[in-house]
Image (cartoon, rainbow, N blue to C red):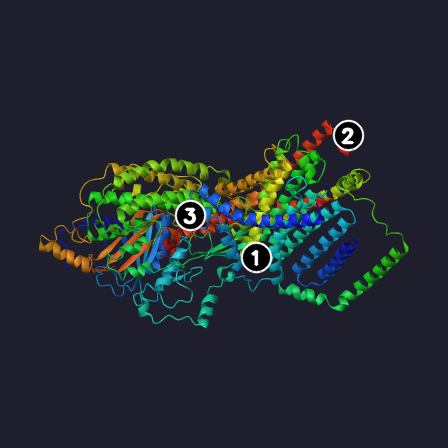
Amino acid sequence: MTTAFYIFGAIAIAATILTITRVNAMHALLYLVVSLLAVAGVFFILGAPFAAMLEIIVYAGAIIVLFVFAVMMLNLGDVSIEQERRWLSPDLWLGPSILSAILLAELVYLLSIGDLGAPPGEPVGAAAVAARLFGPYLLAVELASMLLLAGLVGAYRIGRILDERTAERTSSAEREPVAAGADAPQRVEATAASVFAHDGEGE
Amino acid sequence: MSVVAMLFFIVVLLFALLAAAALLTWVERRLLAWWQDRYGPNRAGPFGILQAFADVIKILLKEDWIPPLADKPVFVIAPAIVAVTMLLGFAIVPLAPGLVIADLNVALLFFFAMTGLSVYSVTFAGWASNNNYSLLGSLRTAAQMISYEVFMLLSLVGVVILAGSFRLTDIVDAQRGMWFFVPQFVGLVVFFLAAIAETHRLPFDLPEAEHELVAGYHTEYSGMKFGLFFLGEYLGMMLSSAMIVTLFFGGWLGPPFLPPIVWFLLKTAFFVCLYLLLRAALPRPRYDQLMGYAWKFLLPVALLNIVVTGAIVVATRSPAEVGS
Amino acid sequence: MAVPTDAPAPALPKTRGVQRANELAERLEKLLGPDLFPEGARVQPTADGIPTLWLASERVRDVLLCLKHELAEPYEMLYDLTAIDERVRHVRDGQPSSELTLVYHLLSFSRNEDLRLKVPLEDGASVASVVDIWPNANWYEREVWDMFGIRFDGHPNLRRILMPPTWKGHPLRKEHPARATEMGRFELPDDRYEAETEALRFVPEEWGMKRSTESSDFLFLNLGPNHPSVHGVFRILLQLDGEEIVDAVPDIGWHHRAQEKMAERQSWHTYLPYTDRVDYLGGVMNNLPYVLAVEQLAGIEVPDRAKVIRVMLCELFRIASHLVFYGTFTQDVGALSPVFYMFTDRERVFEIIEAICGFRMHPAWFRIGGVAADLPEGWDRMVRDFLKWMPPRLREYERMALENRILRARTVGVGTMTTEEAIDWGVTGPNLRATGFDWDFRKTRPYSGYEQFEFDVPLAENGDCFDRCAVRAEEIRQSLRIIEQCVENMPPGDYKSRHPLATPPIKDRTLHDIETLIHHFINVSWGPVVPPGESHFNIEGTKGAYGYYAISDGGTIPYRLRIRTPSFPHLQVLPLISRGLMIADLIAILGSIDFVMADVDR
């Protein structure tokens, strides 16, 4: 089990580094998915299968897909790859890297002096998570869902504004699009809702 | 099961699944032909059954071409993802008592994790092909699959409430009194529709709608890479049929004159055929209609189902039972 | 061979046409002033009785505007626009001098009358565009430019339409070679290959399109020329905002086979098989307007039996064509099965056609003066069986397709066209009737004895995809009614006229008297010599109005043959009715228009 843990950990770290260093956004996302899967594996080994599955379903299965979706929409070409390449110059990454290294050193020091190495007692199942969320943390859950609701409403509003612009543009054309004008708002609504319904699932 | 027996079982299951998927192409063509007043492939072997193998050979030997403008690594990885995730999905399906590769306590979530990951196959394929049709196809898929995953999850919450577990063997055992399609009929309908959308079969095959997008996300694929998409689609169809049977139709349960595994296979085959019949019978809705249907009809229905199921369970069972 | 004297003179329609043309000319002069007409004759008598006026090229726009907007009972539709290369034409008595003649063919529904306007032009001259008067003039003017090199001033995008953009010369001019052997060896070295490919690149700016707005880029999707849903080789370039169609540019010409040019090399008789292939789903229906136009020119009276046989076969082909439409349309919206059932039924139609004609899709079975042979024994039994078989199947298709909720959701309200738009764009046939406009040439201008039959003209209201399909589904029923009347009332008599120009002549008397033997010999070896003149004939085809405009210079081959097809203007409407919709809607619209690329490109 320990071996598996280290393998997962190593994959997660390597994939994350590759995610940062890729110049092609889609390749970066591919590594990010791998990294998330590896983290899910770590969770699984640490006795939290429920968290592991949620990690895959919510992060890998939904949120990153939306990232991919956005990247496909943006029509990134060679220009953006060039830009990424320029951003990888040392004077840009040196500062953050030094700060991260200090943080890492601090973490290692704390781990070495503290008594944090105790293995988890028993697997944390779905029921245990549910009992906690809807017991002591009920207020936090409700607050989080309020936040998501606000996000949902905001996304809907933004979608509406975009749609009004589209309507203006097409109606100034020769002919009023009859069918599209009627059902276009629903499409925007649906996309916006799909973005947030998934976040809601994660709570 | 011992490790050796388990390995043997895995290998047998793997080959059985691949063979079944290949055979299913023949079954589909014959059944469609039958429903459409045609013959279908009837030349190779008895009833044309060897057609499936002829197709496998053909697809293996075909030139495996990668378009020069494609993003090569992603293009190659994409078809593998769907085949792998779908095959992994079968790991948690209990064929009969004790006959399951991984009897996870979060098996149902594992199933969702695998279907969720299979989305990448389509999105990556569409993006890497560098083809506008593929791109449109994969955009459609990403939106469609993410949306329908939501209802798929929500539709099964009722089942989980009734069984009190994510473990599939527990869920089957909980159906000894009554198969869940009776109390969870609404859940079944939503799950079935969502499963069609997830496997993008007609009438919800918009990602690859040939009349609109040529072949959608796999337009540029040929040879065995195309074969893997094909395989993934058929495996997905079998997997979701198996899940329908496990979750709503009592899995391996059935009158004792047939062994449990036969019951399971028969029921699964029935739902696979239902899939095929749908393809023969229905036209395809438009993309926005499909999404509108999901968010305006399936979402409220699935939520209502959860509330009603939860209320009934709380009202009828003792608090200790519910709390466990 | 001399023009036969015993032919019934087509004087009656001729004089009526001249009379109507004179009335109209006077009316126009009163409204617009005196200098409307070129020097020389202003009215031309034609065999078809269509009033024909010559116009001075400077005043064309004024006259057309007046005819469309100011006249009581106006000429609403630009039915056709073409040209004639007159430079080697001999018989032009009473016509003003002209090198290239532009021909506007207008149609007035309120008068139920056509009007032909001819404009004499010098080679290299240009004329004012009428795109702002009739939007469908856009493609017609491009075609005339492409084929004859006549320029249209003020045209928004005067470029080649049927020929590739790299083509040299204008094919329908008389000096342009008609055969590959006259053109030198065809070679395609790499550089030319690249140039040809590059010429096909779509540059949105050339069509007045933007590549992006301030907030997003448009996606340009190249649909075709090979695409599962374009029904042939047809390319449509889509400007997309997401999946929403902002604009569309149909690109045609991929199926162009120079049908009109070939007519100028074939004898009147040997051209018949070419017509079958114009609307390749219409079979002998294509022969009909051609033979009717030639018969009108030659003054041939067709026996009743031949007329009824023609009607019966045309209606059988109408059913076959509509079945293909019905099946492919439902398939275009994603239903896989109906097309197989419908093709099985079509097979039954073809069995009958094969038994009668000996061919299935392209029988080329009509002849100038009648049909190729008499009906075979037992034909009526086959047809009766089919008449019994078909109605329950049609009911089944209605349940399967038209009453399906998904199909209705996909097609109702999609791709709507109003009657005014349809008329403005030259839309005819079932597509026009789907907008609720009652116009069927079989009723309004009965030909080949259609006035003898009882049938209804199905109409719809909204002019959307669903209505276009529903109208055709009902037309199948009406065709069955017509066929039933044909079977019950098949008249006895000759299957071909005994007129000396009927080709090939009926042979029974050739071995008895020398006169018919000579006719037979000449007609078979040279083909008939059709008297000089001009004749146009319209029929109600499967897809809309088919019109053949035959011009004879008194020889054995046509001097010019213009084929007016319905699919050409129908495809031109595509951008109008698909803007603002989604790709899936475009596919439904493409299916519902019922076009055949050979019918568009000819």
Relative horizontal placement of residue C481, taking residue B319 as reference (left or right) = left
Q: Which residue is mark 2?
A: B319
Choose mark 1 or mark 2, whichever is in front.
1
Name the amino acid, label 1. Answer: Lys
Front-lying residue, B265 or C269 = B265
- Please tell me which of labels 1 and 2 falls first in the chain: 1
Q: Quick one: SS at disc 3? A: helix
Say whether mark 3 and mark 2 are on the same chain.
no
Above or below, comparing residue C180 to residue C282 in the picture:
below
Relative horizontal placement of residue C182, taking residue A123 as reference (left or right) = left
Where on the picture, by quarter, is residue A103? bottom right
Chain under numbered label 1 = B
Q: Which residue is mark 3?
A: C593
Q: Which mark is residue B225?
A: 1
Front-lying residue, C260 or C188 = C188
Chain under numbered label 2 = B
Q: Quick one: SS at disc 1? A: helix
Residue B135 in sight in this render: yes
Say whether mark 1 and mark 3 are on the same chain.
no
Chain under numbered label 3 = C
Front-lying residue, A154 or B251 = B251
Name the amino acid, label 3. Answer: Ile
Task: Classify 10 Å Cα crowding around label 2: few (below 14), some (14-19), many (20 and above).
Answer: few
Front-lying residue, C536 or B234 = B234
Choose mark 2 or mark 3, whichever is in front.
2
Task: Measure how far apart labels 3 and 1 are at the Cα level.
Answer: 37 Å
Residue C63 position, x and y percent, is 34, 54
Say whether mark 2 and mark 1 are on the same chain.
yes
Q: Quick one: SS at disc 2? A: helix
Task: Classify 10 Å Cα crowding around label 3: few (below 14), some (14-19), many (20 and above).
Answer: many
